[in-house]
C-alpha cells in the first residue's frame, strides 16, 4: 500500500503531498524534509529506491521535480516506479507539456487527477485514456 | 471583495523572504476568517481552495475546517468537489469533526448523479474512520453492483478500506469480491483483485474459498499476455503490467500452501516467465513479481529453475534498479534454495561495495544469509576489506553483522580472535560489549592461545594507541592485565606460523598500560588499565615497585572510580601474604553457562545467585569461602558456579585474608553503612562493597569492573504477583525483563487448582491498551489437576511502548469448567509491581 505521495522541487519545496495514513502536520513536514534530503543528492545512476524507516521510497526525477511514493517493503518497486511514470504522463497530457508552474497554480487539479489514479493508497485505474476522458468530463460540468 | 486563488498564489510567489510570505498569508488568513464569519456563500469554495493553499505552505488552517463541511453539504458539484478535497487535505480520520460528515456522505453515496457519488466514494476511500466505515458499509456493498464501471471500481477500493477498518463487516464483501473478476473493465478488475487480497490478508480462512477462482485469474492473466497490442492499456508493448502484477500477487497468496492451486497456475506462470519481454521496466516488474510467486508457492522444480535463472539475469543487468530487486529476491530465496544463490556469491560480494547505499544494504543482507562454515574465511575477508572504506552510516550495521558471523561460524579460535581484533581496530566504536565479553570467555578457555592473545593485543594497542576506540582499549588492556607476563622474554612461546615476533620488555608493557592510565580520555579505559597493572604487579615481580608507585599516584586522580580503586589497591600492596592469591589468574569461564545466560532473560537470577551462594558458602565452612572470595575478587559475578567447581584453592590463606580484610583497616575505606558491620555479618557485604561485585556499590563500579567479564548490569527483579483467585484456582505472574529492552516484560503465568475438583477447558486470554503489544504463547495444558496438582504455565510477552510513562495493565478473560460447569471471569490486573 502507498503511504504517501510527494511532489517536491529540487530546493525541497513541496508541490503536492498526499497522505494515505493519518499523520500530524509536524510529522508530515518532518517526513517531507527527510525524504527530500534522502533523495535529492543521489546520483542519477543509482537505484530509484531508498529504504526509509520501515518503508521504502520509490522516487523518480523529472526535470526539477521529484516524484516520490512511500510504499511497503514487500511491494513491487518496479511496478510502482512504472506507476510514477504513468502519473507523470497523465499530468503531461492534461496540462499539455506540464511544468512546475502548472502544478503550482493548479494544485487542486493535481489532487483531482491523483484521486482518479490512486485511492486509499491503492492503484485505481491504469488506463491513461479512461482517466483523461474522465477529467475532461469533470472539467465540463465544473464550468 | 477577496482576491482570487491565482492572485494569492502569485502574491506568495513574489515574496522574497519568509517573513514577507508570513505577512501575506496572515493578511489573507484574516480575510478568510472574516469571510467565514460573515457566512459568505458566493465565494466559499474559492476561500476553501485558498485555505488549502495556505495549508500546503505549512500555516495553520484549523479555523476553516467547518467551512469544508458546509461545502460538502451544498448542492452543486463544484462546491462539493472543493469541499471533499478540503476534507481530505485538511482533516484526517482521527478528527472527531469527521463524524459530522457521515450524513452528507450517505446522501451523496445515494445521489443519482454519478459524479457526486464518485466524489463521496473517493473521500470515503481515502479518509473514512472506523465508525464511518461501519455506518456506510451497506451503501458500499450496494454500489459494488452499480451498472457504472467508474462507480464499481471506486466502491471496490472503498470496500478495501472498510474491511481494513472494521473486519467484522467483511462477511458481506467476501462473496461479492470475486464477482468483480468477471468485469471487462480493467480498473474494476484491478480494484477487485486488491479487495480480494485485503480480505485474504485479514481472514486467511477465505483463502480456501478463493482458491476456486484460480482458473479465472489465470484466464485473465492469459488474455492479458496474449492480447497483442491494446492501445488503452499498453505500456511499452506490454498490456496492463499493473493488473498483471496484481494478479500474480493474488496468485501467490492463493498458491501458498496449496499444491492443487499451485499446480493450476504453473502453466500460466511458466508462460509469463518465458514470454515477457525483459527490455523495459514494465516487463521486468512482471518478471520480478512472477519470480516471487513461483518461489512463494508450491511450484515444481523446473519452474523454480526458471525463476532462479531470471534472477541470475537480473543480477547481471546493468540497470541498478534491476540488480536491486534481484538482490532483494535472492535474499528471500536463499532459505529455499541456498545452492542456487551460492552460485552468484561473487557478484553479490561485489555489490556490497556498490556506490549506491540501497544496493549495498540489500547485498549485505544477502551475504549475511549466504555465509556458512565453508566460506566464512573468504567472505569475512571481503567484508573486513570493505569495512575499512565504508561510509560512516554503514559501519554500525556492517560491524555488527561481521561480529555475529564470526561468532557463529568461526572455524577455529585463533581465527575468531584475529577477525574480531581486526574489527576492533577498524571499527571499535561499533562493536558491542557482548562481543568482547564472548571473546574473553572464548580465550580464557583456550590456554594455548593465552600467549598469542597477549602478543596480538600488545601489537594492536601499541600500533593504535593514539586513536584506538574505547572497546579496543579496554579489551586489549584486560587481556594484557591477565596474560601480559606471557609477553616477556623467556616466558614467551614461539610465534605461531605467519606471525611476526614481538619484543617487549616488562618496562614496555608497563609503560603502555601507564600511558592508557594517564592519557585516555575515557574513564572506563583508565579503570581497566589500573586493574590490569594491579594484576601484573603480582606476576611480574621486577615491576612491582614501579606499579606500586604508579597506583599510589592515582590516589589523586580526578576520576572518582580510579581514585577509589587505587586507594584500595594501594592497601593491598600492604598485605604481601595474600596479594599473590588475591590477584591470581581468572579461572576458565564456563562457556555453556555463559552462552545460556546470554540467551536467557533471567540473567538476574544468575547475578542474584552470587551473594546468596556466598552466604550459603559461609554456612558450609571455610573450604568454599576461597572460591567465593575468588569470585568477588575477580569481579565476576557470573563465574560463580564455574569457579565453585574450578578446583581447590589454598584454604587457610584465604580465611586469613578474609579475617584481615574484615578486621583490618580496610573496612575504613568502605565508609557508610558497611563500615560498622560486625564481623559476624555475611562477609560478602564489605567485600562486595570493596570490589564492586554487589549492588551495594555505586553503579559505575559495577560497570567498569563487572561488565567486561560479568553479567549485564543487574536488573530489578519483580515479586511474583497473584492476579486471580477464585474457586480454588490461582493465577500468578512472574516477571522478567530481557536485558537491554526495558519496555518488554516477559510474564510467566502459572495456574494451579487448590480445589478438590478437576478443572478442565482452562483458557486465559489477555488484552492490553493500544500502546502496548501483546504476545501470548500457548499454555502447557488446559486441565488443572485438583489439590494443587502440577501447575500449568503460559508465557506472555508484553511490549509497553510507553514504558516509564504508563504502567503495565492487563485485562484477563479466564474461562474454565469446574465439575462440568463452565465459568467465565474477567479481571482487570492493575496491582502489578511498579517499574514494569
Image (spheres, rainbow, N blue to C red):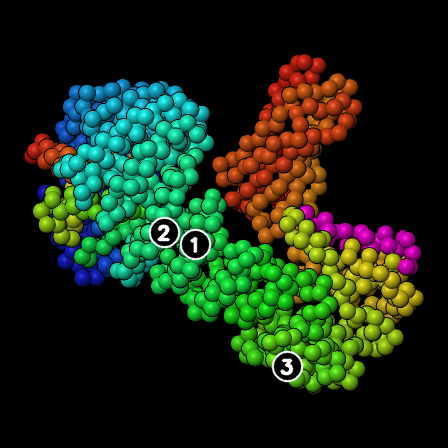
* Mark 3 belongs to chain: B
Horizontally, is B823 left or right of B356 in the view?
right
Question: Residue B531 in the image: x percent, y percent?
Answer: 71, 72
Q: Quadrant of residue B35?
A: top left
Question: Mark 3 packing: few (<14 Cα in 10 Å), some, or many (20+)?
Answer: few
Q: Quick one: SS at disc 3?
A: loop
Question: Residue B142 in the image: x percent, y percent?
Answer: 27, 19
Picture residue at 37% right of the left edge, 56% below the top: B358
Q: Label 2 near label 1: C-beta < 8 Å?
A: yes
Mark 3 to mark 2 CA distance (whole Å):
47 Å
Q: Quick one: SS at disc 2?
A: helix
Q: Label 2 near label 3: C-beta < 8 Å?
A: no
Residue B343, which numbered label? 1
Magenta-colored stretch includes residue B12:
no
State the residue in front, B290 or A47. B290
For label 3, the residue is B501
Quarter holding the N terminus of chain B is: top left
Horizontally, is B608 left or right of B327 in the view?
right
Q: Main secondary structure of the magenta part?
A: helix
**Figure check: B786 above or below B702:** above
Mark 1 to mark 2 CA distance (whole Å):
9 Å
Amino acid at each position: 500500500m502507498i503511504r504517501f505521495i510527494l511532489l517536491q522541487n529540487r530546493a525541497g519545496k513541496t508541490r503536492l503531498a498526499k497522505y494515505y495514513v493519518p499523520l500530524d502536520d509536524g510529522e508530515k513536514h518532518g517526513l517531507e524534509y527527510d525524504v527530500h534530503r534522502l533523495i535529492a543528492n543521489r546520483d542519477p545512476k543509482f537505484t530509484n529506491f531508498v529504504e526509509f524507516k520501515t518503508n521504502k521510497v520509490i522516487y523518480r526525477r523529472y526535470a526539477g521535480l521529484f516524484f516520490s511514493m512511500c510504499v511497503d517493503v514487500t511491494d513491487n518497486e518496479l511496478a510502482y516506479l512504472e506507476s510514477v511514470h504513468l502519473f507523470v504522463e497523465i499530468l503531461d497530457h492534461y496540462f499539455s507539456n506540464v511544468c512546475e508552474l502548472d502544478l503550482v497554480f493548479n494544485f487542486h487539479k493535481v489532487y483531482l487527477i491523483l484521486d482518479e489514479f490512486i485511492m486509499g493508497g491503492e492503484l485505481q485505474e491504469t488506463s491513461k485514456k479512461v482517466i483523461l476522458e474522465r477529467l475532461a468530463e469533470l472539467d465540463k460540468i465544473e464550468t | 471583495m477577496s482576491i482570487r486563488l491565482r492572485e494569492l498564489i502569485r502574491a506568495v510567489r513574489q515574496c522574497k523572504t519568509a517573513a514577507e510570505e508570513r505577512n501575506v498569508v496572515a493578511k489573507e488568513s484574516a480575510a478568510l476568517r472574516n469571510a467565514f464569519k460573515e457566512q459568505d456563500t458566493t465565494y466559499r469554495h474559492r476561500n476553501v481552495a485558498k485555505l488549502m493553499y495556505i495549508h500546503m505552505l505549512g500555516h495553520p488552517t484549523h479555523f476553516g475546517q467547518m467551512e469544508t463541511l458546509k461545502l460538502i453539504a451544498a448542492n452543486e458539484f463544484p462546491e462539493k468537489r472543493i469541499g471533499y478535497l478540503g476534507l481530505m487535505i485538511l482533516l484526517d480520520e482521527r478528527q472527531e469533526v469527521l463524524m459530522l460528515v457521515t450524513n452528507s456522505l450517505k446522501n451523496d453515496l445515494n445521489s443519482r448523479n454519478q459524479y457526486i457519488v464518485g466524489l463521496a466514494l473517493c473521500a470515503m476511500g481515502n479518509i473514512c474512520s472506523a465508525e464511518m466505515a461501519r455506518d456506510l458499509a451497506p451503501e458500499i456493498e450496494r454500489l459494488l453492483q452499480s451498472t457504472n464501471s467508474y462507480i464499481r471500481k471506486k466502491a471496490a477500493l472503498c470496500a478495501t478500506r472498510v474491511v481494513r477498518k472494521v473486519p467484522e463487516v467483511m462477511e458481506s464483501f467476501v462473496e461479492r469480491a470475486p464477482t468483480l473478476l468477471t468485469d471487462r473493465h480493467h480498473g474494476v478488475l484491478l480494484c477487485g483483485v486488491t479487495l480480494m487480497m485485503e480480505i485474504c490478508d485479514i481472514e486467511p480462512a477465505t483463502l480456501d474459498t478463493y482458491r476456486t477462482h484460480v482458473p479465472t485469474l489465470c484466464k485473465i492473466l492469459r488474455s492479458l499476455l496474449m492480447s497483442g497490442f491494446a492501445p488503452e492499456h499498453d505500456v511499452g508493448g506490454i498490456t496492463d503490467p499493473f493488473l498483471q502484477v496484481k494478479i500474480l500477487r493474488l496468485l501467490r497468496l492463493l498458491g501458498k500452501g496449496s499444491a492443487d492451486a499451485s499446480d493450476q497456475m504453473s502453466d500460466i506462470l511458466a508462460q509469463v516467465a518465458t514470454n515477457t519481454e525483459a527490455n523495459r521496466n514494465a516487463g521486468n516488474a512482471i518478471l520480478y513479481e512472477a519470480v516471487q510467486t513461483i518461489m512463494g508457492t508450491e511450484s515444481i522444480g523446473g519452474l523454480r529453475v526458471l525463476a532462479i535463472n531470471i534472477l541470475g539475469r537480473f543480477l547481471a543487468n546493468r540497470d541498478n534498479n534491476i540488480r536491486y530487486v534481484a538482490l532483494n529476491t535472492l535474499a528471500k530465496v536463499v532459505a529455499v534454495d541456498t545452492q542456487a544463490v551460492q552460485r552468484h556469491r561473487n557478484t553479490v560480494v561485489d555489490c556490497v561495495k556498490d556506490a549506491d547505499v540501497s544496493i549495498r544494504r540489500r547485498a549485505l543482507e544477502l551475504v549475511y544469509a549466504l555465509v556458512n562454515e565453508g566460506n566464512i574465511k573468504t567472505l569475512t575477508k571481503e567484508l573486513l576489506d570493505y569495512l575499512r572504506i565504508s561510509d560512516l552510516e554503514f559501519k554500525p550495521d556492517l560491524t555488527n553483522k561481521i561480529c555475529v558471523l564470526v561468532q557463529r561460524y568461526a572455524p577455529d579460535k585463533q581465527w575468531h580472535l584475529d577477525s574480531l581484533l581486526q574489527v576492533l581496530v577498524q571499527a571499535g566504536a561499533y562493536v558491542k560489549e557482548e562481543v568482547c565479553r564472548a571473546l574473553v570467555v572464548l580465550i580464557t578457555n583456550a590456554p594455548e592461545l593465552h600467549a598469542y592473545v597477549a602478543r596480538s593485543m600488545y601489537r594492536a594497542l601499541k600500533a593504535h594507541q593514539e586513536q584506538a576506540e574505547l572497546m579496543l582499549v579496554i579489551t586489549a588492556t584486560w587481556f594484557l592485565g591477565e596474560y601480559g607476563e606471557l609477553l616477556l622474554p623467556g616466558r614467551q612461546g614461539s610465534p605461531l606460523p605467519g606471525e611476526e615476533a614481538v619484543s617487549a620488555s616488562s618496562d614496555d608493557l608497563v609503560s603502555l598500560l601507564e600511558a592508557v592510565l594517564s592519557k585516555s580520555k575515557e574513564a572506563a579505559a583508565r579503570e581497566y588499565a589500573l586493574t590490569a597493572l594491579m594484576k601484573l604487579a603480582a606476576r611480574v615481580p621486577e615491576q612491582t615497585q614501579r606499579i606500586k608507585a604508579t597506583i599510589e599516584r592515582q590516589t589523586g586522580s580526578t576520576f572518582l572510580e580510579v581514585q577509589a580503586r587505587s586507594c584500595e589497591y594501594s592497601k593491598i600492596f600492604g598485605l604481601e601474604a595474600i596479594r599473590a592469591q588475591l590477584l591470581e589468574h581468572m579461572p576458565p569461564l564456563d562457556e555453556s553457562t555463559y552462552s545460556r545466560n546470554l540467551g536467557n532473560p533471567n540473567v538476574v537470577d544468575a547475578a542474584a545467585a552470587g551473594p546468596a551462594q556466598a552466604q550459603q558458602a559461609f554456612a558450609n565452612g571455610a573450604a568454599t569461602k576461597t572460591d567465593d572470595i575468588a569470585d568477588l575478587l575477580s569481579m565476576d559475578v557470573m563465574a560463580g558456579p564455574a569457579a565453585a567447581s574450578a578446583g581447590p584453592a589454598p584454604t587457610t590463606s584465604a580465611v586469613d585474608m578474609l579475617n584481615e580484610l574484615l578486621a583490618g583497616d580496610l573496612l575504613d575505606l568502605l565508609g557508610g553503612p558497611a563500615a560498622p558491620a560486625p564481623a559476624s555479618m555475611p562477609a560478602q557485604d564489605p567485600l562486595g562493597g570493596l570490589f564492586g561485585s554487589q549492588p551495594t556499590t555505586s553503579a559505575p563500579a559495577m560497570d567498569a569492573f563487572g561488565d567486561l567479564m560479568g553479567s549485564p548490569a543487574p536488573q530489578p527483579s519483580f515479586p511474583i504477583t497473584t492476579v486471580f483467585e477464585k474457586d480454588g484456582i490461582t493465577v500468578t505472574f512472574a516477571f522478567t525483563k530481557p536485558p537491554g529492552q526495558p519496555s518488554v516484560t516477559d510474564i510467566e503465568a502459572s495456574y494451579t487448582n487448590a480445589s478438590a475438583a478437576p478443572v478442565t477447558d482452562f483458557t486465559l486470554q489477555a488484552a492490553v491498551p493500544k500502546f502496548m503489544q501483546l504476545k501470548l504463547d500457548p499454555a502447557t495444558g488446559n486441565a488443572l489437576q485438583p489439590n494443587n496438582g502440577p501447575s500449568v504455565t503460559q508465557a506472555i510477552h508484553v511490549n509497553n511502548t510507553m514504558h516509564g510513562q504508563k504502567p503495565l495493565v492487563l485485562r484477563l478473560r479466564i474461562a474454565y469448567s469446574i465439575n462440568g460447569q463452565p465459568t467465565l471471569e474477567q479481571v482487570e490486573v492493575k496491582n502489578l509491581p511498579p517499574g514494569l
